[in-house]
Image (cartoon, rainbow, N blue to C red):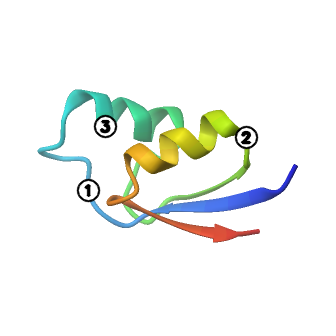
Amino acid sequence: MAKIKITQVKSGIDRSERQKLTLFALGLRKMHATKEVEATPQILGMVKKVSHLVKVEEA
């Protein structure tokens, strides 16, 4: 599977609890934190739900 690099670019403060938990599940705990993960359908679905808070790059 391909890998993607996810970087949190906006804060989770004042977001819904579901979006906060999705960021946490992706491994993003702080601003500008970067995580490299496999591009599975589950991960891509989570990224889509918080796409306004993260930046995604091919790894």
Amino acid type of the residue tagged 2 in the rendering: Thr
Q: Residues within 10 Å of mark 1 (few under 14, many from 20)?
A: some
Nearer the observer: mark 2 or 1; the answer is 2
* Residue linked to disc 2: 40
Check disc 3: other Cα within 10 Å, few if <14, some if 14-19, many if 20+: some
Q: Determine the residue located farthest toward the right in the rendered image.
A: 1
Of the residues shown, which amino acid type is indicated by label 1?
Ser
SS at mark 3? helix
- Provide residue 48's location: percent of width, then percent of height: 46, 49
* Callout in the foreground (1, 3): 3
**Pointer 3 or 2: first along the chain:** 3
Taking the image as shown, residue 10 lies to the left or right of residue 4, namely left
What separation in Å lies between label 3 and label 2 (alpha carbons)?
19 Å
Using the image as rendered, state which of residue 28 and residue 46 is in the foreground: 46
- Residue 18 pos. (x, y %): 29, 28
- Marked residue nearer the N-terminal end (1 or 3): 1
Residue at left offset 61%, top offset 40%:
43
Disc 2 versus disc 1: distance between alpha carbons? 24 Å
Provide the secondary structure element on which disc 1 rests: loop
Front residue (pair 27, 46): 46
Q: Mark 3 sits on what residue? A: 19
Left or right: residue 7 versus residue 35 is left
Q: Provide the residue designation for mark 1.
A: 11
Mark with earlier residue (2, 1)? 1
Which residue is rendered at x = 39% and y = 44% of the image? Answer: 49
Q: Can you say whether 39 is above or below 8 in the image?
A: above
